[in-house]
Amino acid sequence: MLHVDDDSHFGELVTHRLGHEADQITVQTATTPQEGLSILPTDPVDCILSDYDMPAQNGLEFLETIREEYPDLPFILYTSRGSEEIASEAISAGVTDYLQKEADPGHYELLAKRITNAVDQYRAQKELARNEDLLAFTERLANTGGWELDIETGNTHWTDGTCDIYGLAPGDELTKQKAVEFYHPEDRGEIKRLVERCIDTGESYEATLRLIDADDQVRWVHTNGEAIRRNGEVVAIRGAIRDITDIKESANNPTTTQNRSSRRGDT
């Protein structure tokens, strides 16, 4: 954590008290926002604790500068000039938390908890973003996507990989009926039968079918689904879909595939 306060003696006190309350909090100190900014590129931190009333730049101006380079970094405004006006400005400016300085030694227990909570949430968000990036990379590599159907609402939730297979923009989500309509007319009845059977009986399914994407391109897909139960009742279906068009075309046109391989070998 980086603590920025123009009172160096108070900074030392906060470092000591936080070390007593939570030994997992490591504190770096700076007496000006400019000094604090110079620390961040070489010594990244998970949280900034900043005074409000500082000579060159107040805490909210410092926050504005921080947000330009570190939009998600937790920023706690820690001030002796507590007022509803400052609190309101701080919230509007997007501080993570706001806390007024107090002389009571027990106050540092609260400060440590606020810092720990902010850091835990920040790290959890970073981990989630990292996992989402990894999922997106894996889906692109394997031409695969995931999906979930809510039985009660009929709405679906698709990963970006599924949207890509359907030729839709990431975040586009369709009802069950609309999703089924993407399937080839000759295969539409089969996917409807499999999904309805899964809803009625909970029986899992997998099938190789054709769909026509948003660009009117026919794609071969391998799709599967399994029931999610709550109190014994099927409440959702979750599954995966994989674009196997290239595999199908290779199987149907081995000569073309062989020629492509030969050409690659000649270069």
Image (tube, rainbow, N blue to C red):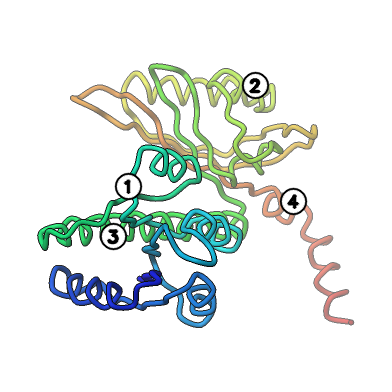
Circle number at residue 246: none
Tag 3: amino acid = Ile
State the residue in front, 20 or 204: 20
User: Dot 4 corresponds to which residue?
Assistant: 249
Q: Give me the C-alpha separation between circle 4 and circle 1.
A: 70 Å
User: Dot 1 corresponds to which residue?
Assistant: 82
User: Dot 3 corresponds to which residue?
Assistant: 115
Compared to 220, does 55 lie above or below?
below
Camera-side mark, 3 or 2: 3
Tag 2: amino acid = Glu
CB of mark 3 within 8 Å of CB of mark 1? no
Which quadrant, please, contains the C terminus?
Answer: bottom right
Secondary structure of the residue carrying tag 2 is helix
Give the x, y percent position of residue 206: 47, 38
Tag 1: amino acid = Gly
Q: Give me the C-alpha separation between circle 2 and circle 1.
A: 59 Å
Give the residue drawn at x 47%, y 73%. Answer: 32
Q: Give me the C-alpha separation between circle 3 and circle 1.
A: 19 Å
Camera-side mark, 2 or 1: 1
User: Dot 2 corresponds to which residue?
Assistant: 181
